[in-house]
Image (cartoon, rainbow, N blue to C red):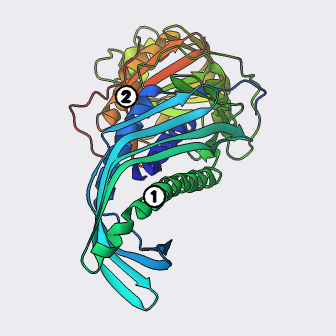
Amino acid sequence: MFEAKMYPSVCITLVLIGTTLGESGPNPGIQSKITQKALEYARQIGINVAEKMIKEFQLPELSGTIDLLGWIEYRITGMYIKSFGLPNSDIGLVPNSGVKFSVDNSHIDIGGNWHVTFGLIKDGGTFELNINDLSAAFLVNVSQDSSRPVLSYNDCDASLNSFNLQLHGGGSWFYDMFLAQMKNEIRQVVPQKLCTEFRNEIEKLEAYIQTLNISRQLDQYVELDYSLVGEQVITADSIGLPIKGELYDVRHHQESPFTARSFNLPNTTAHMLILGLSEYFVNTGGFAYFEAGAMQINITDDMIPKDIPVRLNTSSLKLLMPEVAKQYPNLLMKIAVSATKQPVVKLVPGKFIADVFTAAKVFAILPNKSLAELFVLGITMAMELVLKMGLQKMVLPKINAMLKKGLIIPTMLNASLINTLLTIDQDLIVIATDIQYGSKFTSKRNTKLKTNY
């Protein structure tokens, strides 16, 4: 029962991680795919957590009546778990339906006190319950309603095949004559209780999912809409989620001029989570930041990696603008760049190309820290080489430095992305990654972001 409760929580977390990073018509801007590998990891997490929780779990008191030559009222108190094991468990996807969880040959040993009232007679003692073969299979449907995934209970089949009940103390010798009937009661009640608890847990998870936001403000300028725009695609080895994946200017929430086009994720299940970020998603981000007035940056020499030979110094202008270099000798420069129009990004295999429209004011930084304007450039260009060099020299090193400690996803139970691989395909950025729970990381983990550059 305890493992059954942990499975949905972990699996739904994985689904939410897939939607955390993603209605523009039927086509999504982001697609995510959760693989069987992720579900298997969820199974391992569920077992580990269940085994830790079960040792401290407080079993409730039980009471009822049994007809044994008359109605006997009973109470079970002070129950505690002596041992617990889940030797066989499995989790898998049911195509076009949902997720199936199963446990077989589970065993649990429980001790406690028994109390009975039979007319004017009151009696009691201790007991030992040894469940040796508890099996159960649970099926959860995963569907879509409006803009969120929906969980619903589908089926539960549980059986208690082998167990032993021993009573000690009091008049246990008398009640032992009726153990067969008591065991029949237990054999019926335990599976029913297990399925009822499972249904309740699914309903709680579904209620929680419906309270989650479907958009998130990323910074002071933009927010991301990651609502679902279609049904999940469930196959034997993955769950696919179509996500709107559009970025908006926080202040105006204006629709972008771009249209989402259909695309397919690579047919791979080597990682737990596959994310596809479309050209549409990237371009809505450029539009949102431009509309928000955020596309302005001051570039100074200390921002340029030391191994790049061209420096922001007036000495670099000797060949192109000798008079400027002479008038302002050996002074550092600052470039104030601002966009004059939204950028347009094109993704092709192995390349990230952007048509940018900017104005750049170039200043010399005088000894008294004031600025002397040198010239103004209007720049319209496809920045393939510049962006490629920038990704290699500036962006990726910073991302990799962050990933050395693991990329923690906020509010997702300390979930982190590891073993991340980034590639650029036609019209698409593909991120394949594994997921790790827990906030502690070591340098031995493979967390470097790889690219095909």
Q: Residue at x 44, y 62 (%)?
A: 181
Q: Residue at x 24, y 77 (%)?
A: 169
Quadrant in the rendering for residue 53? bottom left
Q: Amino acid at mark 2?
A: Asp
Q: Left or right of 148: which side holds 434?
A: left
Percent across and percent down for residue 7 are 45, 44
Q: Amino acid at mark 1?
A: Asn
Q: Left or right of 9: which side holds 404?
A: left
Quadrant in the rendering for residue 108? bottom left
Dot 2: element: helix
* Label annotation for residue 422: none
Pointer 1: residues within 10 angstroms few (<14), some, or many (20+)? few
Q: Residue at x 57, y 25 (%)?
A: 360
Dot 1: element: helix
210 over 322 or under it: above or below = below
Percent across and percent down for residue 202 are 57, 50
Split into 4 quadrants, where in the image is the C terminus?
Answer: top left
Quadrant in the rendering for residue 330? top left
Pointer 1 or 2: first along the chain: 1
166 over 420 or under it: above or below = below
- Most foreground residue, 371 or 271: 271
Pointer 2: residues within 10 angstroms few (<14), some, or many (20+)? some
* Label annotation for residue 301: 2
Comparing labels 1 and 2, the label whose residue is closer to the camera: 1
357 over 336 or under it: above or below = above
Residue 422, visible in the rendered structure: yes
Percent across and percent down for residue 418 are 35, 31
Residue 407, visible in the rendered structure: no
Residue that mark 1 sits on: 184
- Most foreground residue, 164 or 282: 164
- Most foreground residue, 184 or 260: 184
